[in-house]
Image (cartoon, grey):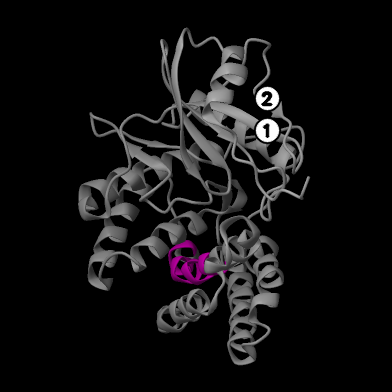
Amino acid sequence: MLPVAHTVFAARGLLDVVLPRYDLGTVRDCRLLQHNQNDTYRVCADHGWFILKVYQAQASYTPRGAHIAYEVDLLRYLHGRGVAVAVPIDARDGRCTIRLEAPEGDRLAVLFSDAPGGPVPASEWDDAFSRGFGAVVGSMHAAAADFRRRSAAPLRLDQAHLLRQPLRLARPFFAHRPDDWAYIRTLAQRLERRLDALARRGLSPGICHGDLVGRTNVHRGPSGVLTLYDFECCGPGWRAYDIGVFRWALAQLVSPARAKQLVAAFLDAYQERCPLTPADLEAITTFVAVRHFWFMGLRTGNAQHWGQGEVDDPALDELVAFWRAWEPSLAEPG
């Protein structure tokens, strides 16, 4: 057998072999939703709708087994504190993770409650959505401040993860672009110095979701309630990073004036639940550029799964163009 980078399990096999291990009543349907870093399937059963996530055997960004356990523990804690999140569900034997054999190595599967409703299209990102999003993120950050585990988090959203690891993963793809590589390395060093300075001035540490882009990982239910899901990038970091991720998404979807208005609405509701320091507010634009490094690492680290279209010259052009366009927004810490 030739080596396999990433298996996609047939939904029929999961329906026949994996889902009967849960107390869901009759399972009527299981369909692949998407193949991304992990594979997600939507499940219809007597007891409702669910999401089955099958994690990669090996991932460029997150240590698998220990990090999945951290994600599960955090979600259960947040749910217990009243935060609207998708909840992990135990199998009949009391286990939350099910191990599946695959040619590339064992993979873990976790079943989650389905977040009600669906994603909010960018065309519907108004002040009300931004306020609601800010409210649920602020509640999540405030509740997570008291989250404790016996073992330390296996993944930290720090400079090593957000800047240095992406540089290591991306370096081979920029070998034929020395000028761009020199620019990227210099910018990463500048961002590291800036984060160090902001940390000294009161940058707030906290547990982050890690991928709150707004167009995914949050659903709006029929009553308007927003539910967070997909915490696979979570970990201790700086709260302003999560806000920077949202601002990063806005920079690619709406005009600068509209983005400023939506961020203001987000922050207004967020700070009613989780106040920010002046350093936190100043750091948001810095974290937009930092997030783009993470995004570069995501694409280069998964090139063997997603294809060379993620790392060809047009893709690298887009990466560098974003930083060059955003760089004037970076204000030096005072």
Sequence-earlier tag: 1 or 2 = 2
| Residue 208 rendering spot, x and y as whole percentages | 54, 48
Residues at marks 1 and 2 touching, judged by CB atoms closer than 8 Å: yes
1 sits to left or right of 263 = right
Residue sitting at x 62%, y 77%: 188
| Residue 177 rendering spot, x and y as whole percentages | 61, 88
Of residue 2 and residue 169, the one placed in the foreground of this image is: 2
- Residue 104 to residue 246: above or below: above
Sort mark 2 into few (<14), some (14-19) or many (20+) by Cα contacts within 10 Å. some
Sort mark 1 into few (<14), some (14-19) or many (20+) by Cα contacts within 10 Å. some
Residue located beneath label 2 in the image: 98
Query: How many marks can you see?
Result: 2
Q: Is residue 182 visible?
A: yes
Q: Is residue 90 visible?
A: no
Give the residues drawn in magenta, as a range: 280-293
User: Please, what secondary structure does the residue beneath circle 1 have?
Assistant: strand
